[in-house]
Image: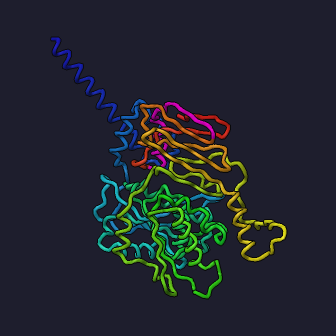
Amino acid sequence: MRRAWSFLVVLLCAGSFAGAESEAQRAWGELFARSDPAKDTKHINAVLSAIGDDVGKLRSLISADVAYKQFSAGWGEHHLSAASGGRRFDVMFSVRVPGAYTTEKPWPLIVAVHGADGDGQTIGDLVETLLGEGVEQYVIVAPTVGGMRNFAGKDYQVRAFLEPLRWARMNLNIDDDRIYLTGDGYGGHCCWNLATMHPRLFAAVVAMGGLPCFESATYTCDMYMENLSNLPVWALWLSPPETSGDVIHAGVLCRKAAARLKKLGNPHFKGSEVLGQTADGCIPPGDEFVDFLRSYKRQARPEKFAHFFHLPHHMRSYYLEAFDLAHEPLDFTKPVTVMLPRGQMLTKEAGMKAKRKYIAKHLFKFWGSLREGQNTCRIRAYAIRGLRMYVTDGMFDLTKAVTIKYWSKTWEGNITPSAECMLRHYAATRDQRALILNELDFTIFGKVKVRY
């Protein structure tokens, strides 16, 4: 009789466990059926309740996540609504899904950015040609920019590409360590900008015929190159005319940026200067294009990195994000007026040097340096009063105390993985490769807050 009762208890426990597991899977499916899971607190709480806030159970759900939509093979047209500067605008984009696509495994993705006279389909066709038979190994996302085709690094221009990328990561099973970026002409300008201000998103970048384009590009073309220290970039540009003294020529600006990257010692930068009159010469051979992409995966938490920026929507890089700036951002919609030293002649060169010095002084900057073997991270910042650290999976040994050196302070303490933190970030990005376990806020005044 005792054995019978024991057997019954085992059956009841097994049934209870299976029921809890089924409830968690049901809640998971309902969460990711939402149009914007990250904003759906009700369904996030339902998942957390079903797993009892257990980090291990959440990891299991994430690693087995196949709750993606199934798409037909080939090209399809999509659209979404994006926001910038308080106004909304529609974004059209083309998506190519491989014939063998299945939600059961993650797929590499290429974001393709078209030229001034093109659209998503034209750049998509070019990338398809460059990939050759390898096209069946990638998902391709190719947005179309509406309105004026004069890229100037404005937020709405960048949103037109970041939002379709986010859509793809949420709706298709994408390998977040193998997201690549490429574009030609106007798209090449955008590639430089996206790669420099959002290096944490990409594994490698091929910018064809573009220039390092940021606000006030004549002065700033090489001012943010520190941001690219860990990102493989292949830039192709047209050689400027030998007689040209015009510093605005794309080739001149690319040369300046390439020289800066060489000085910084980026081992993964490849610069190709092309002779010719048209940007067609900036399109690389397909086999070299494919080999370059295949050579790299994303560095989610580089040992060392730096991030320079002047706009609030560029405050995040890798595992750090500024949340309190020490002064107002630069406004390039207004003329930059500087005073030259007394006695110095006003020349074009002197004026440019003075303006570059002024801009550099007003940039926001931060640096991160990990020493994983020592469970230590050093943080430095300039013109920033508060920084947030996103503690990613594998960044530290969380069974031991962690040491953070920031400004002139040192913080030492324990960081506990949080299921809520993990799920909220995963619901926003669906990034399985860089799970965020907790967040820490540091201020210049010495205050530290573990957020979860």
Relative to 395, is 288 above or below?
below
Q: Position of residue 354 (x, y in %)?
A: 74, 67
Tell me which residue sits at (56%, 39%) in the image. 405
Tell me which residue sits at (60%, 52%) in the image. 315
In this view, the residue farthest toward the right is 342
| Residue 43 visible | no
Q: Nearer the viewer, residue 163 or 336?
A: 336
Q: Quadrant of residue 158?
A: bottom right
In this view, the residue farthest toward the top is 1
| Residue 226 visible | yes
Q: Is residue 192 left or right of residue 445?
A: left
Q: Nearer the viewer, residue 94 or 277?
A: 277
Q: Residue 32 in magenta?
A: no
Q: Is residue 175 left or right of residue 261?
A: left
- Its colouring scheme is rainbow
In this view, the residue farthest toward the front is 343
Q: Position of residue 388 (x, y in %)?
A: 57, 43
Looking at the rendered structure, the number of numbered marks drawn on it comes to: 0
Q: Position of residue 369 (x, y in %)?
A: 51, 47
Image quarter hosting the N terminus: top left
Q: Position of residue 334 (x, y in %)?
A: 76, 65
Q: Quadrant of residue 355?
A: bottom right
Which residue range is magenta in the image?
A: 408-429
Q: Residue 423 in magenta?
A: yes
Tell me which residue sits at (49%, 35%) in the image. 402
Q: Nearer the viewer, residue 151 or 29?
A: 151
Tell me which residue sits at (40%, 67%) in the image. 76
